[in-house]
Image: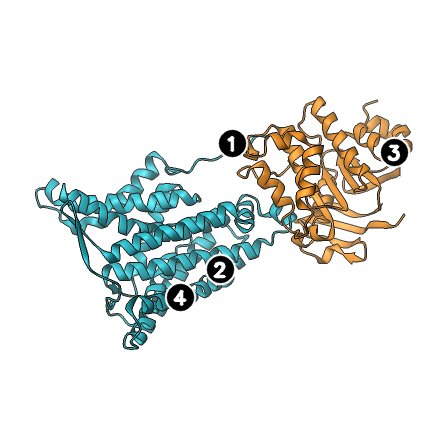
């Protein structure tokens, strides 16, 4: 029982980070039909640039959470500029190209960003100073840290804010209309290019937040951390139904929990042959199962369009 | 009457094929004009070029501006709206959200009053305002597409095949609405395959055939023309 609860708590923490990243994938897919494989690298750049700022301010005497907040804001600005630039430079010229062209470009952008990060921050693993309250608490035999509470709370609030933006505001309405039919939305006065840029900027801000949170959770950051995280978030988006915002949230949290439970029990189930380092296998096992049995994802239902 | 829309030598090509071959026509303020012709004559292509959804050659003058140098999203704030072929409602948005999209570019205080007017003209939209547009019937979607265009307060309304795929009774209703809109002073350019209906409601018409305008006259003269009667009125 205590392992179960413990892994649920760990899974929720991890899952809320996946969900934040998955939202970036699903928003871009919803509006452009493009899997932006460079999105994971944006998360990585967010983590590392926040780390740079946090280190600069570590001895400034400011309280830890304030330093982290400044680091987050800096990372968000860097990532928003990055997301905007990636769309302008790499994807916009290919807007009307065959679908494979932007997909391969996305992989190219991903490699370029990884190499740039390696040149900027080096190959080593960076430890993240523990500036957030790290006290642990216990419930029913399971422990959780205050960092974990902060991660889940911040992710939940951010996602609720995004849902409000998309479902309740004039801008969100224009985003949904553009996702459905950019030419018709144009007739209503919506500049599709502006909406697409904005989608990348918002998705990248979420990525920056995810980067800061994942660095705080594990206490380390490095130049290739974005790759596997990006793939898992993509899996979460597919699991929830790519293009569907609520699906990305559900898929992210579910994937985090599946992974944590899998890692917690695999040792017992296989008599100790396979250990918790097989954790990553579960995400991709889930991806394969979803693609076979429910390729449209858990919440990816299409509204029937009558003639 | 002042000329609102002046088209000079409009040419549209799909790859190497010219779909519209240098046509010229004009629409005056307050007029209701139709563009009739068979399938593939270039009517829809002409409207799409006017709405800047397709690149074209030739001059498109609207008031004192050149439409051919504008982007599609710049048109509605100048009073030009298109109700596209196949309605083009946002299926995953509610009826109310679709109507709100029609007023996207506006920040004047008249939107609420205009919504009331649209609801009065099209009461069905009020009943269904919280329903997803994709769940409406074809006729209701056509009403929604017209209502959405009206929310933009257009001065020139381009209508592309509003009768397409609708039951006869629904066609009558749609055309009653179009008449009511025209009566409010909106200039209308109507593209229709149903020539009889189009010539009934419009004062003037142009006949298009394989990318060219072959006849241009008042609706009464066109209706009496033996060529029109033979080709488009089924006599």
Q: Which residue is the extreme one toward the left?
A: A271
Tell me the cyan chain.
A
Q: Secondary structure at mark 2?
A: helix
Q: Quadrant of the N terminus of chain A?
A: top left
Residue at (58, 48) in percent of width and height: A182
Residue A73 marker: 4
Q: Quarter of the image holding residue A56? A: bottom left
Which comes before the other along the chain, label 2 or label 1? Answer: 2
**Which residue matches tag 1?**
A304
Q: Secondary structure at mark 1?
A: loop
Disc 1 chain ID: A
Residue B219 marker: 3
Front: mark 3 or 1: 1
What is the distance, in whole Å, between disc 3 and disc 1 at their CAs? 40 Å
Residue A87 marker: 2
Q: Secondary structure at mark 4?
A: helix
Which comes before the other along the chain, label 4 or label 2? Answer: 4
Determine the colour of chain B: orange
């Amino acid at each position: 029982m205590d392992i179960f609860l413990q892994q649920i708590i760990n899974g929720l923490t991890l899952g809320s980070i996946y969900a934040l990243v998955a939202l970036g994938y699903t928003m871009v897919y919803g509006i452009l039909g493009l899997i932006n494989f460079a999105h994971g690298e944006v998360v990585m750049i967010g983590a590392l640039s926040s780390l740079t700022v946090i280190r600069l301010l570590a001895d400034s005497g400011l309280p830890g959470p304030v330093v982290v907040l400044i680091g987050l804001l800096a990372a968000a600005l860097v990532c928003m500029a990055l997301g905007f630039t990636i769309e302008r430079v790499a994807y916009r010229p290919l807007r009307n190209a065959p679908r494979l062209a932007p997909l391969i470009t996305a992989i190219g952008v991903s490699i370029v960003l990884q190499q740039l990060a390696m040149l900027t921050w080096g190959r080593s693993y960076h430890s993240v100073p523990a500036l957030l309250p790290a006290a642990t608490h216990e419930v029913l035999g399971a422990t959780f840290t205050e960092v974990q509470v902060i991660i889940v709370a911040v992710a939940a609030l951010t996602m609720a804010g995004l849902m409000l933006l998309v479902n309740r505001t004039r801008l969100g309405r224009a985003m949904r209309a553009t996702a459905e039919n950019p030419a018709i939305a144009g007739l209503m006065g919506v500049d599709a290019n502006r909406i697409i840029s904005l989608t990348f900027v918002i998705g990248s801000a979420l990525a920056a937040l995810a980067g800061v949170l994942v660095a705080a959770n594990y206490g380390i950051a490095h130049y290739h951390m974005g790759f596997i995280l990006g793939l898992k978030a993509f899996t979460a988006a597919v699991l929830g139904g790519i293009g569907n915002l609520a699906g990305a949230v559900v898929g992210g949290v579910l994937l985090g929990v599946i992974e944590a439970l899998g890692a917690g029990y695999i040792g017992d189930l296989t008599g100790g042959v396979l250990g918790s380092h097989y954790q990553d296998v579960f995400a991709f096992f889930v991806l394969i199962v979803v693609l076979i049995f429910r390729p449209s994802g858990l919440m990816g239902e299409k509204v029937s369009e009558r003639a | 009457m002042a000329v609102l829309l002046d088209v000079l030598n409009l040419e549209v090509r799909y790859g190497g094929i010219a779909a519209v071959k240098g046509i010229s026509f004009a629409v005056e303020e307050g007029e209701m004009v139709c563009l009739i012709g068979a399938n593939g004559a270039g009517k829809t292509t002409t409207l799409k070029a006017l709405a800047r959804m397709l690149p074209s050659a030739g001059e498109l003058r609207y008031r004192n501006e050149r439409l051919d140098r504008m982007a599609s999203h710049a048109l509605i704030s100048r009073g030009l709206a298109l109700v596209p072929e196949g309605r083009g409602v946002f299926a995953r948005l509610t009826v109310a959200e679709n109507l709100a999209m029609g007023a996207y570019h506006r920040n004047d205080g008249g939107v609420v009053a205009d919504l009331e007017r649209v609801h009065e003209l099209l009461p069905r939209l009020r009943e269904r305002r919280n329903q997803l547009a994709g769940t409406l019937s074809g006729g209701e979607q056509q009403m929604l597409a017209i209502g959405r265009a009206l929310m933009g307060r257009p001065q020139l309304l381009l209508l592309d095949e509003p009768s397409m795929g609708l039951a006869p009774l629904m066609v009558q209703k749609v055309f009653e609405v179009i008449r009511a809109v025209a009566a409010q002073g909106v200039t209308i350019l109507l593209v229709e395959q149903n020539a009889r209906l189009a010539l009934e409601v419009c004062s003037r018409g142009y006949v298009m055939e394989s990318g060219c305008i072959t006849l241009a006259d008042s609706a009464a003269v066109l209706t009496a023309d033996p060529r029109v009667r033979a080709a488009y009125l089924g006599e």
